[in-house]
């Protein structure tokens, strides 16, 4: 599998946002198969070093989320940001050909950009090529253009704002849209 869905929970929405959770799942969009996955709750203090900046609006947003979502990001399972990024790197290294890896995030300027910036801030090599960044919102819009939007039709499994549950759900609906679009593209080639 050379498609990776990343979902982050953060304390901001800019490239300098501190990461508080990473969820990632490998998947094959042509079949919808989900593969190996990774999840880490990140210690906020470790994520705030080296010029990461939290956003007050995002902090207030988190304060309004469910008790389950808030408990998850403050649990005793938190790890240092460098260990969390290292775990993501291991998932990729052990399961992918990184030069071909296509990394999906929900928003052209969110998950992938923040993850890449965090790798760089902490002196770590980002394990995928920037030109292989893929955008969930773009494929959702393409699906809507052909009258198909499975995002809310596919049952959500897990707690909202859990990075791994979000990554799994996004991989499922991206795959559903992919499968709908590819036959359309192939029919037009003939």
Image (cartoon, rainbow, N blue to C red):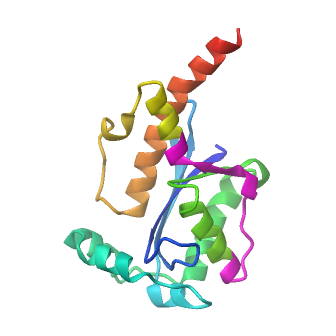
Relative to the observer, which residue lies in front, 46 or 189?
Answer: 189
Q: Is residue 175 above or below residue 137?
A: above
Q: Quadrant of residue 184?
A: top right
Residue 156: give x, y in percent of width and height. 31, 46
Q: Is residue 83 above or below residue 141?
A: below
Q: Is residue 115 above or below residue 49?
A: above
Examine the rendering and report whether any part of residue 32 can be seen. Answer: no
Q: Please state which of residues 53 and 163 is positioned toward the viewer in this rendering.
A: 53
Residue at point 76% right, 47% down? 100
Residue in the picture at 39% in, 33% down: 149
Q: Nearer the viewer, residue 90 or 4?
A: 4
85 to the left or right of 93: left
Q: Is residue 177 magenta?
A: no
Q: Is residue 131 rendered magenta in the image?
A: yes
Q: Name the residue furthest top.
A: 190
**Residue at 58%, 18% in the rendered image:** 183
Q: Position of residue 140 (x, y in %)?
A: 47, 39
Above-or-below relation of 5 to 57 = above
Q: How many marks?
A: 0
Range of magenta residues? 120-138
| 170 left or right of 104 in image | left
Q: Quadrant of the N terminus?
A: top right
Q: Please give left or right for residue 100 compared with residue 25 in the image.
A: right
**Can residue 127 be seen in this snapshot?**
yes
Residue 152: give x, y in percent of width and height. Answer: 31, 40
């Amino acid at each position: 599998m050379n498609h990776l869905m990343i979902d982050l929970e953060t304390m901001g929405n800019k490239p300098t946002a501190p990461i508080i959770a990473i969820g990632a799942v490998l998947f094959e969009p042509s079949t919808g198969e989900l593969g190996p996955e990774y999840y880490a709750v990140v210690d906020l203090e470790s994520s705030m070093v080296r010029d990461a900046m939290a956003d007050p609006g995002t902090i207030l947003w988190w304060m309004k989320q469910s008790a389950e979502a808030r408990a998850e990001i403050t649990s005793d399972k938190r790890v240092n940001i460098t260990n969390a990024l290292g775990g993501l790197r291991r998932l990729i290294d052990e399961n992918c050909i990184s030069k071909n890896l296509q990394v999906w995030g929900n928003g052209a300027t969110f998950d992938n950009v923040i993850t890449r910036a965090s790798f760089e801030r902490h002196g770590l090599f980002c394990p995928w090529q920037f030109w292989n960044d893929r955008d969930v919102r773009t494929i959702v819009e393409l699906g809507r253009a052909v009258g198909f939007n499975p995002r809310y039709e596919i049952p959500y499994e897990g707690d909202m704002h859990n990075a791994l549950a979000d990554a799994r759900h996004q991989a499922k609906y991206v795959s559903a849209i992919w499968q709908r679009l590819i036959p359309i593209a192939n029919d037009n080639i003939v």
